[in-house]
Image (spheres, helix red, strand yellow):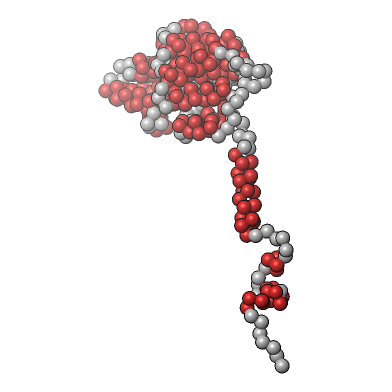
Amino acid sequence: MTGPAPSPSRVSELSPSLHMATGQRKTALIPGSPTATTLMLLASLTTGTCALHAASAPLPPFVLSDCLALLDDDPSDVDDYVSSHTVTGNERAIGHCRAVADVMTGDALAGAEQLDQLSHETARHEVGADDDSTEERANVAADAARAWFAAAMPGKAAEAAGYGLTLTPESIALRLLKDKALLQLDQPQTVIRDLTPLANNPILAAETHRLKAMAEIQTGALTQAKTDIEQSLALEPDDTTSLLGRGIIRQRLNDPEGARADWEKVVSLEPDSHEADLARQDLTVLASDPDALPPSDVTLHASAASPVPDTH
C-alpha cells in the first residue's frame, strides 16, 4: 500500500534528483556555495576593477602631423585631440598645432606671435622629451612666416623666414617665403638676384619660377618673365596664379587673344577664387580697352604667389 505523499516542504530533503528534473540548480544544495548576493557583489567588484584598468590605460602619443591634419576639417577639434593624447613631452608640438589652429580660425596675429616665440625658444626638458632641434624650430619659423602673411604683415614674415634660414640655411621653402615677403615689400630686384641661382634646382621649381616671373613683371622684364612663367606652367599647367600672370605678360606683349585664353581658363578652373575675380576684371577691361593695363597687373604682386608648400 502506497504511503502518503511527502509534503512539499520536504521534497528537497527526500529527493534531490527532483531538483535536476525540474531544472533547478544542483549547486544550490552544495554546502558552503555562495549566495546570489555574494555572486552579485563579486561581479560588481570585477567590473569596477576592469573600469579602473581602462581609466588608467596609457593615452596614445601626440603626433603633430595628425593634429595638423584635423585643421582642414575643423580647427576646433584640436582641443579634443590634445585631451585624448599624451601631453607630457609634447608641449612644443601642442603649442605649434594650437597656434596654427588660431590662424585658421581667424586670429592670425595671435597665432603668428605664438609661432614666432616658439621658433626662438628651446624646450625646457630633459634630453629626449620634446623636440626642439634646429629643423623643428625652422619648421615653426616657416609656419610663423605663413601666419604673418595671413595677418597681412609681410615685414614680419620676412623676419620669421630669415630667422628660419639661420637655422636651416639650405631650406628652399624658407628662402621662397622670404622672397615672397620681399616682393610684397617692393624689392623685386632683390628677389630676382636671390632666385636666379635656383634656376636648375628641382626642389619647388614651379614655385621658384612663378615667384621670379612675378618679380620680373614688376621690373618690366617681360621676356624673361614669360620664360619663367612658361617653365612654371610646364610643371603645374593648371596653377591659376601662373595662368593669371601669363595673361598679364601676354597682354603687355600685345597678345590679347592669348591673355583672354589664360584668364578664361582661370575662371573655369577655380570660379570662386581670388584669382578668378582678378581674371574677370582683366577680361572686362580687355573687352572695353585692349590697350589698357589689366587691373591684376597692379594687384597681383600683393599676393606675389600661391602659399609656399611646407617642404624644406
Residue under the point 58% across and 27% down: 87
Residue 51 or residue 143, whichever sits in front: 51
Does residue 8 show up? yes
- Quadrant in which the C terminus is drawn: top right
Compared to residue 286, the image places residue 182 above or below, namely above
Q: Quadrant of the N terminus?
A: bottom right
**Where, by quadrant of the figure, is residue 247 drawn?**
top left
Count of residue discs: 0
Residue 223 image offset from top left, x and y in percent? 46, 13
Outermost residue toward the bottom in this view: 1
- Please tell me which residue is depicted at 67% across the width and 18% down the height of the picture: 127
The residue lying toward the viewer, choosing from 133 and 130, is 130
- Out of 2 and 40, give the one closest to the viewer: 2
Percent from the top left, x then y, of residue 114?
A: 48, 17
When the figure is inspected, residue 34 is found, relative to residue 214, above or below; the finding is below
Above or below, comparing residue 94 to residue 18 in the picture = above
Image position of 34 (left or right of 118):
right
Task: Give the residue drawn at x 66%, y 85%.
Answer: 5
> Can you see residue 199?
no
The furthest residue to the left: 288
Name the spot of residue 214 as percent of width and height, x first: 44, 15
Quadrant of res 123: top right
The image position of residue 118, as x and y in percent, is 53, 16
Kindly identify the residue that appears in the image at 63 percent across and 76 percent down.
9
